Image: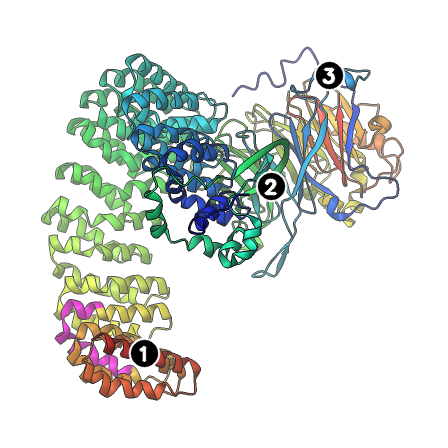
Amino acid sequence: MSMVDEPLYPIAVLIDELKNDDIQLRLNSIRRLSIIARALGEERTRKELIPFLSENNDDDDEVLLAMAEELGVFIPYVGGVEHAHVLLPPLETLSSVEETCVREKAVDSLCRIGSQMRENDLVDHFIPLAKRLSAGEWFTARVSACGIFHIAYPSASDMVKTELRSIYSQLCQDDMPMVRRAAATNLGKFAATIESAHLKTDIMSMFEDLTQDDQDSVRLLAVEGCAALGKLLEPQDCVTHILPVIVNFSQDKSWRVRYMVANQLYELCEAVGPEPTRTDLVPAYVRLLRDNEAEVRIAAAGKVTKFCRILNPELAIQHILPCVKELSSDSSQHVRSALASVIMGMAPVLGKDATIEHLLPIFLSLLKDEFPDVRLNIISKLDQVNQVIGIDLLSQSLLPAIVELAEDRHWRVRLAIIEYIPLLASQLGVGFFDDKLGALCMQWLQDKVHSIREAAANNLKRLAEEFGPEWAMQHIVPQVLEMINNPHYLYRMTILHAVSLLAPVMGSEITCSKLLPVVITASKDRVPNIKFNVAKMMQSLIPIVDQSVVEKMIRPCLVELSEDPDVDVRFFANQALQSIDNVMMSS
Amino acid sequence: MNGGDEFGASGDLPPPLDWRFSQVFGERSAGEEVQEVDIISAIEFDKSGDHLATGDRGGRVVLFERTDSKNATGARRDLEGTDYPLRHPEFRYKTEFQSHEPEFDYLKSLEIEEKINKIRWSQTANGALFLLSTNDKTIKFWKVQDKKIKKICDINTDSSRLIGNGSVASSSNSNSTNTCLANGGLPDNSLSNDFSLQPGGIPLLRLPAVTTSHETSPVARCRRVYTHAHDYHINSISNNSDGETFISADDLRINLWNLEISNQSFNIVDVKPANMEDLTEVITSAEFHPTHCNTLAYSSSKGSIRLIDLRQSALCDSHSKLFEDTETPSSRSFFTEIIASISDIKFAKQGRYILSRDYMTLKLWDINMDSGPVSTFQVHEYLRPKLCDLYENDSIFDKFECCLSGDGLRVATGSYSNLFRVFGVTPGNTETTTLEASKNPMRRQVTTPSRPSRSLSSITRVVRREGGSPGTDGNGNTFDHTTKLLHLAWHPTENSIACAAANSLYMYYA
């Protein structure tokens, strides 16, 4: 046992705790690996710490995960880029453990280090590493190998490049589906580093293997690769190689594959160009919009705006719009909901006339949907339609929908609509708002559910911000202050909360003249909960109002509360008094 | 679908097997009481056949490993020099761990038993074994790995200093409550500034040295817990061939999980009627196809097997194929529906055939033929006259498992009096063996083979022959409904069967 000097003691403990029995302590030490490295110096970090970490890799996953993450940014501590390769061995072992998240982090770190390494170091150390992992006995190593080829490939010699391509092709045909999935996931990244001559031959044949895999899960990931590969290829190659595959996939037996296609299809439109889009992709997309499986229609409906943006308006009106009409009365509420969340975005694409003619009836029918999520989704995107057709046309149908949602029996629905009120207010304008919605906002302050009352208070603050203090003085403050006399203390508490939120928006003058007196009255409430909330609130008012007001009105009130029989009231009153003193001292 | 190699083209019949006792674990001595918690409730071989797992009512999982596998040295074989070459699988105890504990569901005021309902092996990785185990409600994913025993020596801080150094020192003591604070509260910045000034590092600091011994000990760790997804009791779990997903089935629903995601599952089958009074049928067992990732089969209490194509739809309430024995039983009775309930189904290795077990029979189905079973084997026809008694003492609801040999040529299932039966399934093969789970398995063998048959006349004939006097089996032995052999498993590559008789695990080979 060695003795360590006093100032080094904490670091010595840190090092020892790398091997402590308590996982929390090991984790802490690993997270502070950079401190240990600095204490040891660059050379000993390379010669002792890193080998130590390589050997001690049978730790708990949490520790390994932290280690994989730390090593990714460890280049400065081992002496810079020229020594970066010493970090590869511990990461190599970490990238073959069984726990997926550790492996993924190790692969991330390997890529991060690899992308900083010098070219000859890559050739000497990184490429052999990629080869070793690809030949790993267990699938875990081979899975990780797939993720680092795009770093290894560019610096390899031509001969090695050929070898790497053939290794990757073997990975695409590995016995284990996990490895094939990893190969499919990373194919796009790898392909991006490959010369275009090999792209069409080698990569396309790997891609074809993956698209014909027995396992649905592999084919799914191959679909994801379609868009990435398509962007790398020349348009005509994309049309000959990718297009038939995607059209095939769009009619795959497995709904999960079609679901992926529905999600990805719009990304391919640009890669293939307008003509093939019209002849092949639009029909494929229309099929997906009418798919038997609701999940596929949900995915397709969710992309309808993105897809239409790429098409010219006539095509959209001619082919897509009829499907949209069908979807707006789909049997699955989730399909309608997905449609409602994006359909507003179609308005700018179609232009004003087509929107009024075709989209408006759909909006209106969705606004009357029996399922609240559908209505909410329409309302949340209202600003987009407003820009195209103006609020007048919509407001008539809008209002009943809003009122109905405002009184929905599910509090989450009410909560959602409250959150959109400021948006609606800004779109509808003061006049409309005063007439129809003002009363609703007050009504929510007395909701049975606390979350709603809280949101209602917040909503008032946002409205005051939107329309300004003067408007609020007229339309909000009097009504709110009236409710402070509610017999139920929980409602009085909501009002206090609303007042405390409004105060900063209303400014010092109104706060002193209108709000503060109400608060001071409330400090005489019979319920202790109200009283200590008053104390808390007063603390928040201190910075808003003038110091003289603090001394004249707030302090006496708090002093009184600080002698309250209730312990909590005294506590918060004293806390507020203390913060007054602090403000005095600092000023 | 390539099932051609499974049952071979008829013609050359495999020779009948000569079963012998191989091993017993946890054998009961005479007069010893069986503890309820020790009763084995699940048996499963892993894919290679090198490991065997059993689960019991006490929530424990016990693992056995093969001792005669390829890496066994020749010397060892010489040492054990026996009359016959050590060809048949022999196992030894490897480790055990507590998989499930009894729990209490406070919301529903229900006790959740710790009993292991099913064990399924998952993909081996990095030399570690992985398995899923489930009780009625909770599925757990276990990793069992041989860990080298390590010893740490040569640390910086001396233990004698620890005592004298107050709060900081105690940070090396894992029992102390302020340990994390001492480490976590390290003032990074001030320290790191000092260190960077010394280019050679601080020579006094040493990394802890670790000595690794060659001894290893298996350590089981629970990696994931999949819970809160079943309202009813889980009866099956099954891994998908994609190595990524598995299903769990309860009485009314089947859920699909990703092995890596424990907080989310997808309901793929839901047979729960809107009104529970309309309930006529429950799910009794479910299994994925061994190679087709999108096919799964589940059986019902009405005796039907449904094949499902996961590609068709997200919610697979409509089956793609339905297998039912349309043949009406000779005499319908009160028990007809109860005994039709399928207690277990198993896919054959290649996935073309499905074996099902109901109370009285084993049935083999070809998934390309939904008109009826390919063959039906009577398991204990002599009990038919006694169904009433069996109903009285609830034995009629016993859930017997079934299994197929790796080559698909034979099937096996359990019965009462600790008996199990092995049938040859190749067309023309009449091999039928009855064995007793004891050291002398052939003691009670029925010599007259009862032909697998679907014809009614033969059933009645069997009944007449075997049901001599009440309470005795075909050989005149009294049958004992309390000693039932519910769980058994066939080795995936060799003719070896592991079966559970109460708390004992018996192994046989041929």
**Mark sitting earlier along the chain (3/2):** 3
Please report the bounds of the magenta region as a residue range. A462-483
Question: Does residue B371 appear to the left or right of A135 in the view shown?
Answer: right
Q: Which residue is mark 1?
A: A578
Cα separation, mark 3 vs mark 2, equals 37 Å
Identify the amino acid type marked 1.
Gln
Q: Which residue is mark 2?
A: B133
For residue A216, what is the image quadrant?
top left
Question: Does residue B464 appear to the left or right of B423 in the view shown?
Answer: right
Q: Which mark is residue A209?
A: none
Identify the amino acid type marked 3.
Ala
Return the chain for callout 1: A
* Discs 3 and 2 carry the same chain letter: yes
Q: Main secondary structure of the magenta part?
A: helix
**Local crowd at mark 2 within 10 Å, few (<14), some, or many (≥20)?**
many
Question: Does residue A505 appear to the left or right of B252 in the view shown?
Answer: left
Return the chain for callout 2: B
Q: Which residue is mark 3?
A: B75
**Local crowd at mark 1 within 10 Å, few (<14), some, or many (≥20)?**
few
